[in-house]
Amino acid sequence: MTYDLIIIGGGPAGAAAAVYASRKRLKTLFITAEWGGQSVVSEQIFNWIGTPAISGSELANNLKNHVLANAGESLEVKEGVKVDLISKEKDIFKIKTDSKEEFRTKTILIATGSGRRKLEAKNADRLEHKGLTYCASCDGPLFADMDVAVVGGGNAAFESAAQLLAYCKSVTLLHRIETYRADEITVEKVLKNPKMKAIKNVEILEIKGDKFVEGIVYRPARPHDGSGAGGDKITGKETELKVSGIFVEIGQIPNTDFVKNLLPLDKVGRIKINPLNQKTEIPGIWAAGDCTDVLYHQNNIAAGDAVRALEDIYLYLHTK
Ligand SMILES: Cc1cc2nc3c(=O)[nH]c(=O)nc-3n(C[C@H](O)[C@H](O)[C@H](O)COP(=O)(O)OP(=O)(O)OC[C@H]3O[C@@H](n4cnc5c(N)ncnc54)[C@H](O)[C@@H]3O)c2cc1C
């Protein structure tokens, strides 16, 4: 059997696409490794339109329920399954999964989002889950009344710091450059907390600790633009900050490994798309959300991009 469409990914992009595909009665298979996508770890999401505030896990549940409410007639759902490979044979695509299944389809929408960028510093791997973590809302409460560090300078780093400030003794944010990528309003709010300290222009060298994190070693970062800006860069002195927990929020890596031999990607691995219609450079494959090279990545944008893709896929299937 050959599907009209296979949607890969169960975040806001994939979920929105599944709802539209079912309403358009496309013979669709929806495959996702997990439900809800990356913001599932977020304690509060304040800008998902229609809900003044919602937790990441509640958002994930809502997405799942909305997709499942449309499943049945034309929409089939496979959860807990990862797509490993896509190949093309004439006008038909073949999709292979880690459950060793193979599916055929006329079109594909890739909505596989992105995952965490790992900290490259001595002992960071060894001490992961032993004080070094990538999820403040999951592990933060374990560090109540302790000194902790957050590595990063975007919204996720500042959101993590804000959560940790509620119960940690102190939070030090270490950032590699001079400017923060986080929204100004969030930066201001977090930095004015008396338990908060921020150090900019640093390079993380090493995580200290035998069985559990005991500290983080950094030194003034080499200037990116050669200007030498950033105070103690001149000394290059290594400093050890004693902390019991380290929360890393240094960005995302797109989940596109399984298409790297099929689709053109940009230099950070995101799928190149035409933002007018979400088409990739291979006819029959569309992509939407954080796995693509659009400039901004947010829940609402991912869902909207996927809807745009679905409109285009529908036209493609019906005018071919
Ligand atoms: C901590 C944090 C907080 C955030 N807070 C906000 C916020 O407050 N507001 C906001 O608008 N945005 C926020 N974002 C950004 C937002 O989460 C993303 O823009 C959005 O999730 C992107 O949606 P997506 O559907 O493209 O991808 P994702 O949400 O990443 O979903 C991808 C899905 O694909 C699945 N998948 C991946 N690879 C495969 C595969 N090979 N086979 C099958 N399935 C696969 C995954 O399991 C996942 O379900 C936050 C992000 C983070 C990390």
Image (tube, grey):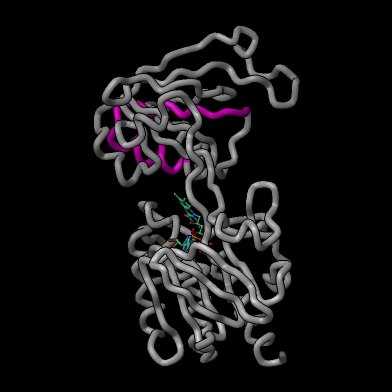
Closer to the camera in the image, 141 or 316: 316
Q: Does the magenta stretch include residue 320?
A: no
Q: Is residue 159 magenta?
A: yes
104 with respect to 90 (left or right): left
**118 to 1, vertically: above or below:** above
Q: Which residue is drawn at 64% across and 18% down?
A: 230
**156 to 5, vertically: above or below:** above
* Span colored in magenta: 157-177
Q: Which residue is drawn at 59% across and 10% down?
A: 236
Provide residue 57's location: percent of width, then percent of height.
34, 60
Provide residue 218's location: percent of width, then percent of height.
50, 18
Provide residue 278's location: percent of width, then percent of height.
67, 70
Please identify the quarter of the rendering in which residue 221 is found.
top right
Closer to the camera in the image, 76 or 166: 76
Provide residue 298's location: percent of width, then percent of height.
55, 58
Quadrant holding the C terminus:
bottom right
Please identify the quarter of the rendering in which residue 122 is found.
top left
Q: Which residue is drawn at 64% across and 73% down?
A: 88
Q: Which residue is drawn at 69% across and 47% down?
A: 267
20 with respect to 80 (left or right): right
**211 to 289, vertically: above or below:** above
> Is residue 295 visible in the rendered structure shown here?
yes
